């Protein structure tokens, strides 16, 4: 037993002995005899057994007061005894927050650099601390660092390891609390996590756009209430997924921006009396705006208390999960034996342990299931912070596992989704069979009546009656006799059935956001540009506007085009002006985004073909093509060159 030995001379009175014995009982010790010299420094004291009995030729009283074990490294100075082993196991967080280790080291290096800058550390001490931190980071990356629950969390594990290597590390925690330290680590983590997730979102979007491109002419029934509603291009349906994921990416970008404020220097709650340079630390850690100006939290209490970022991040992950769950449900429905619109690769399906014929879409079912897990993490955080008093409370230690889990699961789900789409095949014949139903164009028939002046409600009722007539007659809607439909409403003319022609019906959908061919091409151009396909030469965006945009920037863009791609055949290298047609109306030449490669002629894909707006291009008079909406053309280096000089730009 280790203890402090208090020895009284053998001539001490019994009253004094009793007093010492009482003190010893209060201290949880006993009165003992010992062997030794005249002063306590000479005692070769040996204690035996629970009562610490000793043999002694000299009678005296020895008071052995037990010493506390080594004080807890973080806050042990206030306490006599260490926490119980159960308390250590219960309160440790290093088992999960070690994930922040590299961010913690990054923050510590910036903090020590700032301390040296303000004179609280010498340059030699700063360099020693940085060397030690770099060595620890290397061990962590190699999986060789030893973590201990005795030091509670990632911060103290690193600090203790650093202090053993570099004595100057004892100064590292100057003007810093674990409260603002972990807040800084988490903000660095959120910035990194958002970048990673946005990258995974882009990967999924590229996979989806590839499927849409490969099946750009496939039509499928659109559904409401799981009932066939109206025909849409498969690409139009897949563009919905791109829109969802784009909003998701934007939300993570917002979270990253909200995380871009430095809390370091806020201390535990009220900062410090030491003079710090928080702006210096902010620049060191990259907490700056677009202009390089440091962004620093403005309230020390809010900085260490704020958990909005955790909730925003978990909310963004949960919403991605909801979107992925909806996509999964669509794919499960399309893959069913009743539809068979698509087929998933065996690599992302499993079988049945009993039924040999089964091919189960487990990958997308798991995506659908994990969305509930992501929502649960969000609710955990909302419940955790509800009603907590300012500022830091130990409850907040539990804010990290839900965040880490949401991050891991959403990254995994997005990777799986990309793999599913990359290996998915579309059965165009089954899709065409499903969409070949005139009933899907009943709304177009109502629009036909509206065009001839019939109020929509009246037209809706009349078409409903015609649909019921077709169902009772057992004939397709477009095969009803003109006389029969005119009995329903006299506004039906001889051309009434033409509006039930699928190809013509789709071509009439010209409005923005509608699933018409022209709009589908426009959306291909839009998403190709957003995902960087145009920059890779995969597609070309053709607009009817000023050759290189409007406003003062057009001059710069035109000069850049001339420098990189040569002269335009129509303008001789001069900036083109707006031209006028025979009617005196102002028209603009084409603006074509081209890959910057000299000597390559513009080509088009023969499979898709191309046409100027209203008529095939006539080289003698091509003004028609200037007055139409934008077009998207897919070009192939193996395709035939375009002869029209409007498309003969050299790059």
Image (cartoon, rainbow, N blue to C red):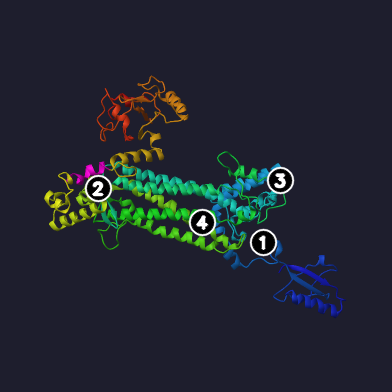
The kind of secondary structure the magenta stretch mainly shows is helix
Please report contact status of discs 2 and 1: CB closer than 8 Å, yes or no: no
| Rendered image: mark on residue 121 | 3
Foreground of the two, 398 or 217: 217
Q: Position of residue 316 (x, y in %)?
A: 46, 53
Q: Residue at x 13, y 51 (%)?
A: 480
Q: CA distance from mark 4 to mark 1?
A: 33 Å
| Rendered image: mark on residue 72 | 1
Direction from residue 506 to residue 293 in the image, left or right: right
N-term mark: 4 or 1: 1
Determine which residue is flagged by label 4.
311
N-term mark: 2 or 1: 1
Task: Check if residue 364 falls in the magenta segment.
Answer: no
Q: Residues within 10 Å of mark 3 (few under 14, many from 20)?
A: some
Q: CA distance from mark 1 to mark 3?
A: 25 Å
Foreground of the two, 245 or 157: 245
Please report contact status of discs 4 and 2: CB closer than 8 Å, yes or no: no
Helix, strand or loop at mark 2: helix
Depth check, mark 2 against mark 1: the one in front is 2
Determine which residue is flagged by label 2.
450
Helix, strand or loop at mark 3: loop
N-term mark: 1 or 3: 1
Depth check, mark 4 against mark 2: the one in front is 2
The magenta segment: 497-508
Task: Check if residue 502 falls in the magenta segment.
Answer: yes
N-term mark: 4 or 2: 4
């Amino acid at each position: 037993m280790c203890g402090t030995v208090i020895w009284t001379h053998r001539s001490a009175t019994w009253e004094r002995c009793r007093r010492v014995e009482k003190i010893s009982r209060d201290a949880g010790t006993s009165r003992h005899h010992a062997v030794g010299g005249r002063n306590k420094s000479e005692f070769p004291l040996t204690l035996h057994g629970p009562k610490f009995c000793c043999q002694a030729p000299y009678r005296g009283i020895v008071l052995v007061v037990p010493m506390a074990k080594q004080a807890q490294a973080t806050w042990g100075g206030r306490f006599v005894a260490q926490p119980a082993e159960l308390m250590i196991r219960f309160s440790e967080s290093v088992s999960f927050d070690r994930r922040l280790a590299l961010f913690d080291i990054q923050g510590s290096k910036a903090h020590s650099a700032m301390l040296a800058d303000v004179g609280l550390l010498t340059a030699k001490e700063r360099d020693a601390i940085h060397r030690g931190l770099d060595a620890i980071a290397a061990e962590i990356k190699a999986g060789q660092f030893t973590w201990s629950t005795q030091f509670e969390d990632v911060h103290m594990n690193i600090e203790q390891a650093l202090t053993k290597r570099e004595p100057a590390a004892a100064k590292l925690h100057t003007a810093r609390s674990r409260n603002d330290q972990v807040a800084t680590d988490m903000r660095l983590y959120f910035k990194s996590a958002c970048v990673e997730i946005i990258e995974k979102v882009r990967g999924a979007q590229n996979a989806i756009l590839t499927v849409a491109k490969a099946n750009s002419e496939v039509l499928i029934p659109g559904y409401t209430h799981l009932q066939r509603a109206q025909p849409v291009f498969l690409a139009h349906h897949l563009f919905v997924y791109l829109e969802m994921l784009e909003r998701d990416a934007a939300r993570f970008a917002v979270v990253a921006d909200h995380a871009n404020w430095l809390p370091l220097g806020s201390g535990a709650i009220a900062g410090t009396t030491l003079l710090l340079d928080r702006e210096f630390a902010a620049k060191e850690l990259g907490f700056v705006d677009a202009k390089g100006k440091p962004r620093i939290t403005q309230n020390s209490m809010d900085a260490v208390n704020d958990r909005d970022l955790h909730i925003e991040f978990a909310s963004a992950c949960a919403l991605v999960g909801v979107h992925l769950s909806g996509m999964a449900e669509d794919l499960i429905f399309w893959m069913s034996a009743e539809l068979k619109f698509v087929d998933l690769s065996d690599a992302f399906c499993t079988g049945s342990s009993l039924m040999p014929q089964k091919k189960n879409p487990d990958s997308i079912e798991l995506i659908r299931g994990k969305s509930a897990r992501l929502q649960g993490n969000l609710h955990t955080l909302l419940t955790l912070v509800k009603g907590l008093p300012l500022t830091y409370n130990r409850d907040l230690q539990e804010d990290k596992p839900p965040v880490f889990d949401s991050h891991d699961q959403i990254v995994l789900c997005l990777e799986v989704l990309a793999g599913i789409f990359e290996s998915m095949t579309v059965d165009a014949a089954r899709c065409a069979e499903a969409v070949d139903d005139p009933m899907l164009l009943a709304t177009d028939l109502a629009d036909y009546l509206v065009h001839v002046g019939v109020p929509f409600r009246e037209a809706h009722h009349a078409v409903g009656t015609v649909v019921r007539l077709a169902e009772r007659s057992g004939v397709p809607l477009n095969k009803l006799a003109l006389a029969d439909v005119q009995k329903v409403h006299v506004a039906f003319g001889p051309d009434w059935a033409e509006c039930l022609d699928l190809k013509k019906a789709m071509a009439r959908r010209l409005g923005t956001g509608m699933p018409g061919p022209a709009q589908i091409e426009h959306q291909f151009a839009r998403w190709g540009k957003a995902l960087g396909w145009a920059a890779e030469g995969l597609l070309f965006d053709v607009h009817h506007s000023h050759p290189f945009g409007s406003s003062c920037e057009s001059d710069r863009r035109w000069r850049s085009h001339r420098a990189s791609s040569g002269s335009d055949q129509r303008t001789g290298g001069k900036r083109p002006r707006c031209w006028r047609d025979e009617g005196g109306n102002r028209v603009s030449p084409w603006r074509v985004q081209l890959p910057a490669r000299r000597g390559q002629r513009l080509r088009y894909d023969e499979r898709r073909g191309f046409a100027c707006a209203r008529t095939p291009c006539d080289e003698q008079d091509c003004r028609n093509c200037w007055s139409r909406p934008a077009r998207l053309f897919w070009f192939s280096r193996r395709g035939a060159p375009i002869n029209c000089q409007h498309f003969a730009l050299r790059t």
